[in-house]
Image (cartoon, rainbow, N blue to C red):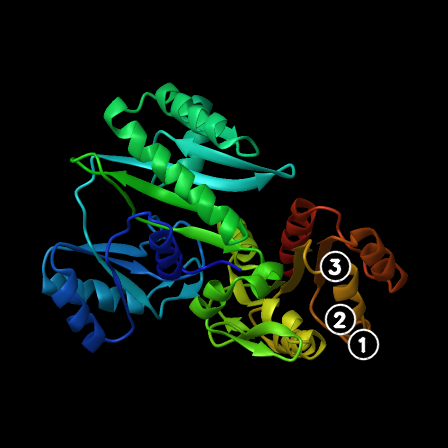
Amino acid sequence: MLLHENDGKQVLRHFGIPTPSGVEVETTSELSQALLSVGMPAVLKAQVPTGGRGKAGGILFAENDAQARAAFSTLLKSKINGFRVSKILVEPRVKILHERYVGITVSANRAWLMIGRAGGISIEERANDDPSSVVRIPVDRESDDLEEAILKGLRGLGLSDRANGAYATVCKRLLDLFIKTDALTAEINPLAELEDGSLVALDARIDVDDSALPRQPAIRELLQLEPSATGWGKSKKESTLTRLQDGVVGLIGLGGGMAMAVSDWFAGRGFGLSGTIDMDCALASGQAQAVISSVLSDLDEDRDTKVILLNMISSGNRIDRIVSTILPVLQARGTKAGKPLVVHLQGNGGAEATRMLRDAGLPNFDGLKDALHATVEHLGAAR
């Protein structure tokens, strides 16, 4: 479950990582109140579940109240990678000496701490062009050994000695957050170094393991999750299909971080999402069958949707049990004239899930890359 930037920054602050003091607003009256506390100059940031907001015009700067109001109006009328903007985070603009990157992700069943010499826009492209600009450190080691590895990595990146202690502290606190919140990803990009040597997290991307929500009361409260008879699943924030304009792919997924990655992949190839739903809440509340039936019906009837991608990767929720729950809906739909459906359901119990789908005449792609390319092939055939 991907936390929105504003929520993610609350978690960062809880673990002692400084962020700007921002206010999330939805109306002009809320904006006026926010500007009184934030002051000038300010930055206004669209709160949408997608990356690349800066490139897409989702982050605007203001030197005075008039510019802030104009920026607010522009953002509210905009779409960022297909997502309509309804909430905007208003923060004071800080004077940045350097932009860095710090993140923790899981790869090949290991957690890795990554530190980038430069952060901000196009971090991935710069890392590919200059691999030496990013240090990767496995975090499954003793704390003393880890701190030395962090300091060695910082020196290797050529960061100033006076700031290395502060960077090492942020890295250790981010790791503490990663472990204690059951996160799958925890990234700060950019992490700003100010003229006085202090560090401030200007963005936050934190993706929490959905299956860990029962032991994460603070995250449940932050996401406004309500208890149900079968678990923590009914969210006041996200529980239905989100309609998007000018898109052609309907996405039924699991986890906000994965949805963002898929959306960005399609956007990079000139395609947008027509609608998306995170099945977290439906699965946790025992409503998966009813919800997926309704969503498939909506997407099948939608004129803009050309292909539907059913994409779930799960270890906490057994994927074969998910398939067992939704298979009757998929089989019933197969007898009707619906949109092309691309299926990628993998994870714990994936082999059994693939067998059940195959027996029902539904191919299940082994890899996400193959499923994405198959979706694009269907889009080409639909033109």
Mark 2 is on which residue type? Ile
Label 1 sits on residue: 332
Precedes in sequence: disc 3 or disc 1: 3
Tell me if residue 258 comes above or below residue 214 in the rendering.
above
Mark 3 is on which residue type? Ile
Tell me if residue 157 comes above or below residue 332 in the rendering.
above
Rate crowding at label 3 as few (under 14), some (14 to 19) or many (20 or more) other CA atoms within 10 Å: many
Cα separation, mark 3 vs mark 1, equals 20 Å
Precedes in sequence: disc 1 or disc 2: 2
Q: Closer to the camera, 182 or 362? A: 182
Q: CB of mark 1 within 8 Å of CB of mark 2?
A: no
Q: Secondary structure at mark 2?
A: helix
Q: Secondary structure at mark 1?
A: helix
| Quarter residue 41 falls in | bottom left
The total of numbered circles placed on residues is 3
Cα separation, mark 1 vs mark 2, equals 10 Å
Q: Position of residue 347 (x, y in %)?
A: 72, 52
The image quadrant where one finds the C terminus is: bottom right
Label 3 sits on residue: 319
Rate crowding at label 1 as few (under 14), some (14 to 19) or many (20 or more) other CA atoms within 10 Å: few
The residue lying at 42 percent from left, 24 percent from top is 153
The residue lying at 69 percent from left, 68 percent from top is 339
Q: Which mark is residue 217?
A: none
Mark 1 is on which residue type? Ala
Label 2 sits on residue: 326
